[in-house]
Image (cartoon, rainbow, N blue to C red):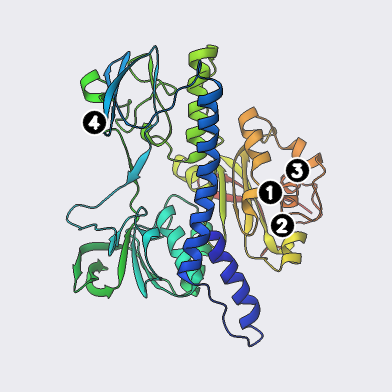
Amino acid sequence: MWELAQRVKNVNEAIVSVGRNKFEISWEEVRKTLDEAVFERKFQYSCHIKLLATERKDLFTHMRGHGKMITPNRVLISRENEPDIFVDTDYIILATGSRPSKIPNIPVDEKIIMTSDGIEEMKDYPKSLVIVGAGVIGCEYATIFSNFGKTKVYLIDRAEHILPFEDDDITKMVSDNLEKHGVTIHHSAQLKRMEIVDGEVEYEIESNGEREVIRVEKALLAVGRVPNIQNIGMEELGIKMGRQGKHIGDDDTQTNISNIYAVGDCSGRIMLVNMGEIEARHAIEKIFDNKTERLSYDNICTIMFLDPEVAAVGINEKYCLDKNIPVKIVKLDYSVMTRAIAMRKTEGFFKIIVTNDDEMKILGMRAIGEHASTAIQAVALLIKTGRGIAELSELIHPHPSIVEGVQECVRMLLNKSIFKSSVFKDKLACYSLVNGIKIPLQRL
């Protein structure tokens, strides 16, 4: 959906400026494309599973049903219209996923008031849509529907800024673009009431001591996700939540029952597809390969499908300020990157954070702009290996490419760049951050 919406937006930015009518895509076409993509991926997996079950019956068995742990070594599988099956096993891995969170006293029917489970089942674009929650999912859907240009979008933000966990320069750019495309953001707003009235959604918010009642066609709740851990035998077996009470599998994917592991969304730790796969692989390696190296969560790569897209790995500047971590930071604007200039997509920047010492080990990176997600992988590798930035400064990057900006960033930190932040102040920044104070680094 995001890819389609971005294409529609990009086409319209090009043709409307020369006086042509806006390009539109029907919701039927959106659904058709979405269904085809989902089917293609699911078909690949289902075919592989069936072939594996046929060719390696000695190693692999696949069945559908509801699983429940009876003992640490026995699982009951309940199936529709078929007898129950008991499976005896040495190890169990819980990988039951998650579902959208809901809000008490708000009636979710998945047709008028929806979660992300129901929004893709709509029959047409809603004329107006309110989104509750200004985290990643809420902002992604606000981006999608505003870019299609068929829906008036309202976004309820409890905090002062959207994406409250991210740096202010990231949130400002995303917020400005949402508002530029017609999104109304209710900042610092408390949702007092939401109900279905005459087949539409009526909601009441309070912001800065004032209340406002607004009527829209549909609503989307985007307030996080909860693990699917009900009725799988956890309570009966005494599987405990982790040290902070937030997730299971707290000891490196292992639960307090040594032969039972929890991975992916159901562990409640980091609900990302790539993290779920890594955790699952890690658990298997611990079980069958006696792996002792603990899984690291320091170099997790994420993409936020916003406008422009945001990619992240490691810590950000906000975290450094909150924890008073002394660091060096470099920031490079897209407007000085050759590929961005060629694409006419010069909105965005790279920001890299390193240790405040001569080694300058990379701690984190934020990228916002076109192709941002292609730029963070090398940085993630250096974070995992605990290496400094010297290798990146010497690596020959493809030209012209967005990733060249990474090389220019580290050259600025090393004071080897042709660009000097002291000259190009509106495009570049290079500074240390100590006790919350920014100190310019680069010299002529």
| Residues at marks 3 and 1, CA–CA distance in whole angstroms | 10 Å
| Residues at marks 4 and 2, CA–CA distance in whole angstroms | 58 Å
Q: Earlier in the sequence, mark 3 or mark 1?
A: 3
Residue 160 shown left or right of residue 14 in the figure: left
Label 4: state its secondary structure: loop
Numbered label attached to residue 441: 1
Asked if residue 168 can be seen in this view, the reply is: no
Residue 200 on image: x %, y %? 24, 72
Q: Residue furthest bottom?
A: 19
Q: Circles 2 and 1: CB distance less than 8 Å?
A: yes
Residue 194 shown left or right of residue 32 in the figure: left
Asked if residue 215 can be seen in this view, the reply is: yes
Nearest to the eye among marks 4 and 1: give it. 4
Residue denoted by label 4: 231
Residue denoted by label 3: 414
Label 3: state its secondary structure: loop
Nearest to the eye among marks 3 and 4: give it. 4
Nearest to the eye among marks 3 and 1: give it. 3
